[in-house]
Amino acid sequence: MKGSPAVLFSKMGSKTVFRMDCPFAKNPVERASWDHPFRKDLSWARGVGILLYAEDLSPVSHFTLFLRSGRGWYAFHLRIPKERKWVVLELPKEISRIEGVPSGFGKVEAVRFSVWRKGNRSTRVYFGGLGLLPGKGDCAVVRWEGTRQLSPGSRRYIGGFCLGALGLLRRLGMEASMVSDLDLRGGVPGRIGLLVLPRNVTLPGSALRPLGAFLERGGKILSFLVLPGALAERAGFRRERRSGGGRVSGVLSVEPGLLPGAPEKVPFQAAMTGGLVPAGKGARVAARWAARGKKPRPAVLLSEGFVHLDLLPELSPVKREPELECFYLSLLEKALPGAWRKAASNALEHMGAFGPWKDWARTRKALLGLAKKAGVALPSLEKVEKARKACARLLARGDARRVFLESVKVEEWVKRAFCRAQPSKKGEFRAFWCHSAFGVEGMTWKEVAGRLAANGFTAVFPNMLWGSAAYYESDVLPLGPGVEERGDQLALCLSACHGAGIQVHLWKVNWNTGNRSPEFIARMRKEGRLQVDSRGVEKSPPWLCPSNPLNRRLEADAMLEAARKYPVDGIHFDYIRYPGGDACYCGGCRSRFEKRIGRKVSPWPGAVLGPGPLRDAWLQFRRDNISALVSEVSARVKKLPRKVLVSAAVFRNWPVDRDRIGQDWALWCRKGWLDFVCPMDYTPDTGEFARSVASQIRWAGKVPVYPGIGYSVWKKQKGIYTLVEQVKTARRLGAPGFIVFNLGPDEAGEILPLLGLGLTKKGLSRR
C-alpha cells in the first residue's frame, strides 16, 4: 500500500521469509501494509495460523491480518507477545470483524498484513508462514453474515452472540468452531452433528438445501430466539406473535422427562422473547417461562432435528450460574446424547486450572508461591484437592451432573485464592469510571461508596455531563433524562462518597451530545453549531463543533459551573477530541480556517484532505481547537478558591491520535494543564498494555499517568486474572495509580470484593 516499502526476501536460519520494513521514523504513515494472493477455502477451518517475528514492538500500536473475500474483508486484530522471537499466533474465525461485503470464508482470495504506527521509530517484521487451523469437534456456530444492510455496529452486536454461543459450548466441554452462513451453501461436513444458530434472523437462500440434507442425515439444530422462516416451518413451529424486547427476569419451568438433567425450576433473565409455538406433528413444548405476574409462555420447543430456546439469553455471563448451565447442558444432551458425560469429563480434567496455568498442579504451585511471597495462608487449596478426588469417584459412578456442579465451586475457590494472594500498595490512587449518572443499577450511591471504600478504592468518576445535558441542577445545560424524577445525582453522589472518604471527579463527555435533550440539539442544528463530515453529513449522534467559540464557551462554562457550585474533587475531560478523521468540515470551520491562514480554500474540503502544507495547517487547526478548551478550563479552575484537579481520559496512541482525532494530550501535560492523565488502555493483552503504559509515562513527563484498564470491555473473554495482572504491570512501570472501566453491577457485586481480598486491600501495604 502507499507509503510501504516493497517486501524483501530474507534468510532466518535455513528458512527464507518475507521481510517487511516499517520506516515510521522517515514516513509517519498511519500504517504500513502489504497484500499477497491467498486462495484458500476456509469454510470449515477453525481459522488461520501465522508465523511472525518483530525486531522492535515499541513503535507499533497493533497488527491486523485481513482476508479478502468478494467485495469485503475479514479483519483479525492481532498482537505479537514478544519481540526478537518467532511466535505462532492462532486466529480463530470468530474473532474477525467484517468490513465491506465479503462472500464467505470459502472464497478467500488474498491476505493483507498491516502494521499500525504508535511511535516515530522504524522497525521490521518478518512473515514466516500462513496456514489453516483445522476444524475440531462435532459442533459449529453459524455467524449471521448474509444480510448486506447491517451497519458495523449491528455486525458487532450479532458477532457478540456468536462469541457467546462458542464460549458457552467450550465452557460446557464441547469443542466447537464458527462457520459463516454464506459457507453453508457448500454443504455440512459429516463430522458436524450440531449447528447452533445464536440469533440468525435470516439465512441465505443457497443454504436451505444443504441444511435440509444435514437434517435428513440426522443432524440437529439448536437455535435461540429466532428460527428463520423455512426452518421454522420444517420444524413444525409457527409464529404466534412478534418478538418482544426489554430485559425481564422470570422462571423457567421444565416439563418432566423432556430435558435430561435440567432443574425443574431455573431463574432466567431474558433480553428478548420470541413468538414461536408448536404447530406441526411432533412439535412440543419442553419448558415454559413466566415473568413475574405474567402468564407462562413456551420457552423451549422440540421437534425432529430441532431444539429451540424462544428467548434471548446472556450467553457470556461474568459469573457462572451452575443451575442455568445445567439447563443449557440439558438442551445439548437432547441434541447430542453424551453431552453430560463429555462436560463432566472435561470439568474433571481441567478442575483447578486458572489463568495461564493449564492444570491443577501448575495452578497450585503458582498460588503457593504467591501466598508465600504475600505472607498469607490459602486453606481453600486443600478443599480443591479433596474435591478433585471426590469428583473422580463421582464420575466413575456416572454422576456427571454432580461433577459438573462441583467444578463450578472449585473454580470460585481457586479464583478467590488467587485474589487473596495478591500484594497491596500503600498510597495508590484507585478509581472506577461510572458511565451511568445514576450510579450502579440496583444500588444507592451510599451502597456504591461503601463498597468502594471497603475494598480500598479512593475515587469514582461519575458521568454527570454530556454536550447537551447535565445530571444535576444546571443553569448552563438542560437537565438530563430522569433527573426530575430521581433527583440531583451529583449532590447525591457527593454526599455519599465524601461520607465514605471517596473522591468524586466529575466526568464530562465533551462535544458529544449523546442524543440527549432533543430541543437543545435542534437549536444547535439551527444555529449551525454541529459537526459534519467531508460530505456535509451531520455526525450521528450529533457533536458540537470545537472551532465554534460559542461551543467552546458552553463546554467550559458547564465544567466550571459544576466546580463552583459543588465540592467536586476534580473535573475530568472525556471525548476531548474529534469523533474521527472525517470531521469537522462545516461552513464555520471553513471560514475560521481561512481566516487563520489568510486566504480562501478551494475546493472545500478537498483541498485539506490530501497531503501537503495545507493539510498540515488543517491538522494543527484541529488540534488547536481541542487544546484551546483544555487550556481555558485549566486556567479558570486554577483561579477557584479551593483546589480542584483537572484530568482527561485520552486515546492511548498519542503520536497517531494527535493527527487522527486532534487530541494532543502530551502537549497538555507539558503545558501543565492537566494534574493527571488517564489513557484508555483497553486491551486484554497485558504485553501490549505494558508497552502502551511505558510509552505514555514517557510522553506525559512529570504528569502522573493513571492507566485506564478496560475490564468491562473484555471481561467476558479474560476476567479477573487479566485485571489483576494489568494493575501489577502498571505498578511495576511506575504508575502511581489506575482507573478501571466501568463500575456496573458485575464490578460492584463481584470484582470489588475480589480485589479487596488482596490487591487493593484497605490499610495494608505489601510489596
Image (cartoon, rainbow, N blue to C red):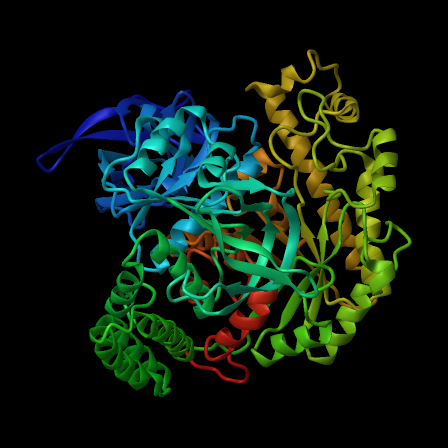
Spot occupied by residue 629 in the image (x, y as percentages of width and height) = 74, 45
Q: Is residue 25 visible?
A: no
Spot occupied by residue 379 in the image (x, y as percentages of width and height) = 34, 88
Residue 47, by quadrant, is: top left
Give the residue furthest to the front: 281
Residue 398, by quadrant, is: bottom left
434 to 546, vertically: above or below? below
202 or 25, nearer to the observer: 202
Residue 535 appears left or right of 326: right
Residue 260 appears left or right of 126: right
Give the residue furthest to the right: 475
Spot occupied by residue 448 in the image (x, y as percentages of width and height) = 66, 73
195 or 545, nearer to the observer: 195
The residue at the point 20 percent across, 74 percent down is 396
Q: Is residue 253 visible?
A: yes
Quadrant for the C terminus, please: bottom left
376 to 660, vertically: above or below? below
Residue 522 appears left or right of 156: right
Spot occupied by residue 718 in the image (x, y as percentages of width and height) = 42, 58
Quadrant for the N terminus, please: top left
749 or 267, nearer to the observer: 267
The residue at the point 29 percent across, 56 percent down is 337
The residue at the point 34 percent across, 82 percent down is 371
504 to 218, vertically: above or below? below
Give the residue furthest to the left: 14
Q: How many marks?
A: 0
417 or 473, nearer to the observer: 417
